[in-house]
Image (cartoon, rainbow, N blue to C red):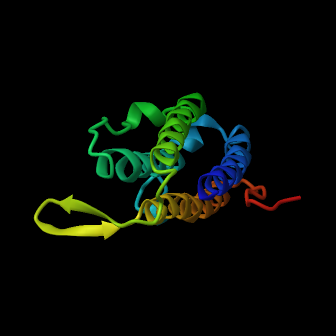
Amino acid sequence: MMYTTLLHQYQLVLSARGALLNYCETIRPEHLAQPIPSFNNDSMGSLMRHVANTYLGWLLNFLQQEQRPYFTEDNHKNLQAIRSMFEQVNLVANDFLLHHKDDMTTPLSLPREGEEALSITPLQLFTHTITHEFHHKGQLAIMSRQLGYIPVDTDVIRD
């Protein structure tokens, strides 16, 4: 039951992300790559790469102890590359949910280099990654506004 609920929740995330990516089609490619001083000179593309890498880091590399290379600057040079990056993220998220579908609430002990192990549930990790994405989605709207665009509604519930 929780597995099905989380799959539905991720579909809502995909819908909101799709609205953001469709909006990004209206943004000039050079603006997607433009460093923005008020955001530590990150660009919209590099922030989207950070979001994608967070999914890889928590749901794949950290939790399942697989070591998949993180996305690099080449993965956010244009919107097609960004979309491709998130298609890979979707596979990771779906695999994660399937892998933990029978038990999302038992804490796992996750080793951390030079620190005490972290005790966290798969549900907490999944929730962290999607709320992290939504946090940065808001920042992406602000970044685009600073570049002269008028952001569209990219929330889960929108007109």
Look at the image and tell me in which quarter the N terminus lies.
Answer: bottom right
Residue at (43% x, 61% y) in the render: 125
User: Count of labels shown?
Assistant: 0
Spot occupied by residue 133 in the image (x, y as percentages of width and height):
54, 57
Horizontal relation, residue 37 to residue 111: left or right: right
Residue 70 at x, y percent in the picture: 34, 39
* Nearest the eye: 42 or 90: 90
* Rendered position, 92 above or below 115: above
As drawn, the residue found furthest toward the left would be: 114
| Residue in the picture at 78% in, 58% down | 153
Residue 91: x and y in percent read 52, 35
Give the side of residue 88 with respect to residue 156, left or right: left
Query: In the rendered image, which quarter contains the C terminus?
Result: bottom right
Q: Residue at x 51, y 41 (%)?
A: 33
Residue positioned 46% across, 50% down in the render? 100
In which image quadrant can residue 105 be found?
A: bottom left
